[in-house]
Amino acid sequence: MQPQDKKPTRRVTRMALLTAIALTIFMAEAQIPNPIPIPGIKLGLANIVTVYSMFLLGPADTLMILVSRVFLGSVFSGQMMTFLYSLSGGLLCYVAMLFLRLVLTKDQIWVCSCIGGACHNLGQLAAAMLVLRTTVVVFYLPHLLLAGLCAGLFTGLCAQFLIRHLDQSGG
């Protein structure tokens, strides 16, 4: 095998590992009872992988990891209805982070993740309005935005710590 042939294999392997990690985190988090009785609110720990990927691997790889995780998470959890909500939230978050990564540094990942978390919940709310054919769910907006900002802050700080730790260890 030629040296240049190893790079695509390494890239695909890294993406597969990150997808598996995100999927494992997603499935583990799904087993934890939600202490907040508002639909759509959860910590979203699998998004640590998405934020990490956006800043270290780039947009194309991140999109493939995100869509794979959302699809496989829906299949493995047996809740295909969540696919639409997760995908719409994930894609809106992805677009927001895509633009934010152009202006933010690795020290500001938490900012990107906060905004991404809020956008994720906006995307889910938009999907709910389409599926339910009502705008009544817009009353969840303040709660979902606050939850998205808080969850985004936590996952962003985790991703930022992970990146900083890997940079220092040479990993």
Image (tube, helix red, strand yellow):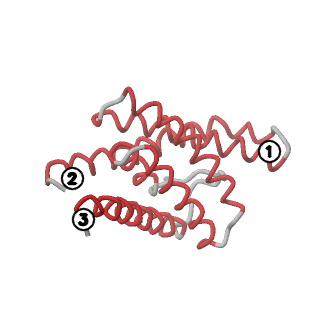
The percent position of residue 23, horizontal first and vertical second, equals 48, 66
Binning the other alpha carbons within 10 Å of mark 3 as few (below 14), some (14 to 19) or many (20 upward) gives few
Nearer to the camera, 43 or 100:
100
Q: Amino acid at mark 2?
A: Leu
Picture coordinates of residue 119, whole percent (x, y): 57, 38
* Residue topped by disc 2: 166
The x, y position of residue 147, in whole percent, is 54, 43
Choose between 142 and 83: the one closer to the eye.
83
- In the visual, does 124 lie left or right of 151? right
Q: CA distance from mark 2 to mark 3?
A: 28 Å
**How far apart, in angstroms, are the residues tagged by discs 2 and 1?**
41 Å
Q: CA distance from mark 3 to mark 1?
A: 50 Å
Q: Of label 2 and label 1, which has the lower sequence position?
A: 1
Picture quadrant of residue 144: top right
- The residue sitting at 59% across, 51% down in the picture is 41
Q: Which mark is residue 130?
A: 1
Per the image, the residue denoted by label 3 is 2
Q: Earlier in the sequence, mark 2 or mark 3?
A: 3
Q: Earlier in the sequence, mark 3 or mark 1?
A: 3
Q: Secondary structure at mark 3?
A: loop
**For the point 63% across and 35% down, which residue is it?**
142
